[in-house]
Amino acid sequence: MRSVLALDQGTTGSTALVISADGRVLGRGYREFQQHFPQPGWVEHEPADLLRATLDAAREALAAAAVVPECIGITNQRETVVVWDKATGVPVHRAIVWQDRRTADRCVALAGSRQFIAERTGLVLDAYFSATKIEWLLRSNDGLMRRAMNGELLAGTVDTWLIWQLTDGAVHATDPTNASRTMLYDIDAHAWSDELCMLFGVPRVMLPEVRTSRGDFGVASARHLGLALPITGVAGDQQSALFGQGCVAPGEAKNTYGTGAFMLMNTGTKRPTLGDGLLTTIACDANGGPCYALEAAIFIAGAAVQWIRDGLGLIATAAETEALASGLTSNDGVYFVTALTGLGAPHWEAEARGMLVGLTRGTTRAHIVRAALEAMAYGTADVMQSMQARSGVTLDALRVDGGAAGNAWLLQFQADVLGVPIEKPAMLESTALGAAGLAGLHTGVWSSAAQFRQAQRVSVVTPGAGVADARVAYVGWQRAVRAALNWARDGQR
């Protein structure tokens, strides 16, 4: 049976899967790594930890599979950036993670360029993206800018860092899906923008070559995994999940419930209009080539459950949330606006913070847990409405993945709030699956995206008896969000 090694380098850990042509997982590996929070709002990773966790997970998966895969597909946490010495491969600083807010003030200072940036990149001006992170790194130490301009330093998102390391420095490359998240890439010209590089003070010489997501990214040296394997597929995690879910035609959409929640809708070759806090990004078509997609980023989803577990100690495991939520007949008016790191789409209010409303003496930990799950569904409904308005397409189903998609209560509530069926794949790790699909298409493991999709098993959750109650509850959510926005904006006066 032909197979592919998929490397999924995420925000809190690295997963490796050996996936066969018939869709089975032959081997699996996973490694967590340390998170660093040097100041409030700052989030960093050690680049060496990212590489080490990825390689350890890959070795574990290969040992379990006991087969030789034909190629490697890579998917990664997006927007997180690394800058390293071209000669030695040593990073000049820890990686700055996508969640990091240290450059928020810089974005405020660039407000006059907001429209220009949006027109070129399809993105909103925000510290979430890579450009201001690279700029901050180059300005953090005297001499780094000079070295970058002299071609002594290289920069890239995590995919680029892994490719460079795996190929022993032979390939410095990325793909369009990751490039389109940097705020340095012109998504109409499909090229790095000299104007944006100048605006952010990022020397273009340090940026990677942009190659098609399904294509040649060099060969991983045998010294890393015990065998030399070609890297033939690369995509940022959310676009990879979109491909893994088979959303390769205009109007098809998926939502990933991970640390944050990310909803993407394929819009084909036509770039959608800006607005409603939605992003336009580059995704993959059925052949692995570039197409456009609308994206909504909800910063906090599963992370709210982690906070309830680790920060408040109300639960011991995330698995407890399903029983706690289903044990209540309603939310009793309790809402959790999970703006722990600001609000993303469709509001994009960086100063918003988490808010629990509707608390009474009858409120229990079950209410707070249920409110966190409900928030994922409500936030998805918010952005789905915006996407339908921008695209002119009415979705008839939503495909889902990510860790929280294993929560049966959440999926039923999501179907009730949206009023459309929810399609869940048997394998929820769609990010890894998408990377495998891209890589395997290039090497002939699958002959087409349709054949790749046919190898996946899918279950469907339909709207049920709770639709009317969910719609009433959704009105209460909108009221709670207005309260959070008013609190944030009142503090800015």
Image (cartoon, helix red, strand yellow):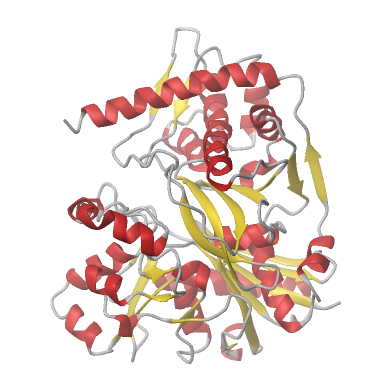
Is residue 306 shown to the viewer in this render?
A: yes
Q: Residue 108, percent across and down?
A: 21, 50
Q: Quadrant of the N terminus?
A: bottom right
| Residue in the image at 56% along x and 57% along y | 293
Q: Residue at x 19, y 33 (%)?
A: 492
Q: Is residue 430 left or right of residue 98?
A: right
Q: Furthest residue to the top? A: 361
Left or right side of 94 for 3: right
Q: Position of residue 94 (x, y in %)?
A: 32, 68
Q: Residue at position x 17%, y 54% from top?
A: 109
The reply to whether residue 366 is visible in this rendering is no
In the figure, 100 relative to 210: above or below? Answer: above
Q: Quadrant of residue 36?
A: bottom left
Residue 79 vs residue 62: left or right? left
Toward the left, the furthest residue is 142
Whether 475 is drawn above or below 14: the answer is above
Q: Picture coordinates of residue 448 (x, y %)?
A: 79, 72
Q: Is residue 169 left or right of residue 268?
A: left
- Is 480 or 426 nearer to us in this picture? 480
Q: Please tell me whether residue 102 is drawn above or below residue 212 in the rendered image.
A: above
Q: How many marks?
A: 0
Front one among 136 and 421: 421
Q: Position of residue 57 (x, y in %)?
A: 61, 69
Quadrant placement of the C terminus: top left
